[in-house]
Amino acid sequence: EVRLVESGGGLVQPGGSLRLSCVASGFTFSSDRMGWIRQAPGKEREGVAAVSDLGYTIMYADSVKGRFTISRDNSKNTVYLQMNSLKPEDSGTYYCARVSRWPPFPSPGGWSDWGQGTQVTVAS
């Protein structure tokens, strides 16, 4: 059974930072491309970042380029999302996900599994 468990969300002031983590199990993590999706209230889910199996290829949504960094540690079956210079519009639920098609976004259908999500709120 595929399991993706996110953590690290919370409330942060604009300009602050958070680091999200996702521990994966139930599949060969080191062979799969991974990424992060987010969904704000009343909006569709959008891809935020994705990383190839060995971490050599990375992509970001334009809205987070220069502020977010995705990384992975295959020895720990974990993918991370370092989020800096956070803005109120970054608020939402963040999901860790397996990539089913590259690139996984912006077109829909690029993800095969995702976790329960972790809430990020950017507000003063």
Image (cartoon, grey):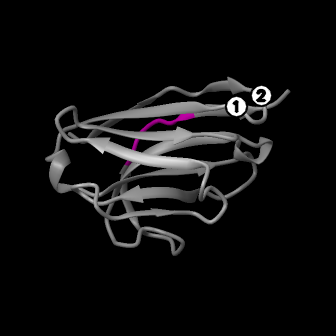
* Location of mark 2 (residue): 13
Q: Residue at x 21, y 55 (%)?
A: 54
CA neighbours of label 2 inside 10 A, class few (<14), some (14 to 19), many (20+): some
Q: Residues within 10 Å of mark 1 (few under 14, many from 20)?
A: some
Residue 104 badge: none
Give SS at disc 2: loop
Tell me the residue that label 1 is attached to.
16
Query: 44 left or right of 114?
Result: right
Spatial CA span between label 1 and label 2: 5 Å
Q: What stretch is highlighted in magenta?
A: 114-118
Task: Depth check: give the residue in front, 61 or 5.
Answer: 61
User: Which residue is rendered at x = 41% and y = 58% of the image?
Assistant: 50
Q: Residue at x 78, y 34 (%)?
A: 14
Position of 72 compared to 59: left or right?
left
Q: In this view, does 49 lie above or below 103?
A: above
**Residue 28, image x and y in percent?**
14, 47
Can you give x and y, in whole percent of width and height, for residue 31 in the image? 16, 55
